[in-house]
Image (tube, rainbow, N blue to C red):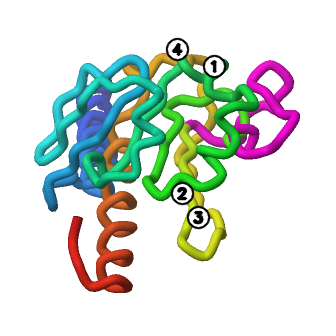
């Protein structure tokens, strides 16, 4: 009887693992070149490249990167007042990977990383649209770690899909690709 129960438990557990993996297939669409401000993820993804860049890359409006990832080393520095105008009008999606506070602080005068409310999600992203509105994304539950490499791969795949969808929608609006 114990052998049967053990066997059924293993079958059930492996079925759950397969179900979880199949709900979030790997991203394998359009090539994405992402600028990373901070620590580059130590993961490798199909059709995705990460390039380590300095924060000043956020000021460059050329379409060299389809998105920016910001990691914990720069969470505090980029919350300072001199960056608010950049983030308020940034035309390229920016994602704060494993952010432990709310991401709106990067656009709100007087808010800093030190006085920010705790995160309600694992990773947050946003972009400024041509009409001045802000489009945002959020993924997963908050984490006790801010280390980029503690980010589940499923969150990366969701981000990659959203980046692709953002640019696809933008291309349809303006009629050209990046």
Distance from the alpha carbon under mark 1 to that under mark 4: 8 Å
Write the residue at 30% across / 63% down: 164
Does 25 appear above or below 53? below
Quarter of the figure with residue 43: top left
In this image, 147 relative to 141: left or right?
left
Write the residue at 37% across / 75% down: 170
Instruction: Please name the residue that numbered disc 4 is placed on.
Output: 73
Instruction: Please name the residue that numbered disc 3 is placed on.
Output: 135
Is 173 magenta? The answer is no
In this image, 101 relative to 33: left or right?
right
| Mark 1 surroundings within 10 Å by alpha-carbon count, few (fewer than 14), some (14 through 19), many (20 or more) | some
Distance from the alpha carbon under mark 4 to that under mark 3: 24 Å
Distance from the alpha carbon under mark 2 to that under mark 4: 21 Å
**Disc number lying in front (1 or 4):** 1
Q: What element carries label 2?
A: strand
Distance from the alpha carbon under mark 1 to that under mark 3: 23 Å
Distance from the alpha carbon under mark 1 to that under mark 2: 19 Å
Q: Give the range drawn in magenta.
A: 104-122
Write the residue at 38% across / 17% down: 39
Q: Nearer the viewer, residue 14 or 60?
A: 60
Instruction: Please name the residue that numbered disc 1 is placed on.
Output: 77
Instruction: Please name the residue that numbered disc 2 is placed on.
Output: 127
Ranked by sequence position, the earlier of labels 4 and 3 is 4
């Amino acid at each position: 009887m114990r052998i049967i129960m053990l066997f059924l438990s293993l079958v059930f557990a492996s079925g759950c693992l397969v179900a979880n993996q199949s709900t979030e297939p790997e991203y394998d669409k359009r090539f994405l070149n992402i600028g990373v401000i901070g620590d580059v993820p130590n993961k490798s993804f199909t059709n995705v490249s990460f390039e380590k860049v300095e924060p000043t890359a956020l000021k460059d409006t050329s379409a060299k990167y389809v998105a920016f990832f910001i990691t914990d080393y720069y969470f505090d520095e980029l919350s300072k007042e001199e960056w608010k105008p950049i983030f308020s009008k940034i035309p390229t999606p920016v994602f704060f990977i494993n952010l432990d506070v709310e991401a709106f602080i990067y656009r709100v005068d007087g808010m800093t990383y030190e006085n920010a409310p705790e995160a309600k999600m694992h990773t947050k992203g946003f972009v400024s649209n041509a009409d001045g509105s802000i489009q945002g994304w959020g993924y997963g539950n908050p984490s006790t770690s801010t280390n980029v490499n503690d980010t589940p791969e499923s969150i990366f795949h969701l981000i990659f899909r959203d980046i692709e969808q953002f640019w696809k929608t933008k291309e349809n609006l303006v009629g050209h690709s990046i």
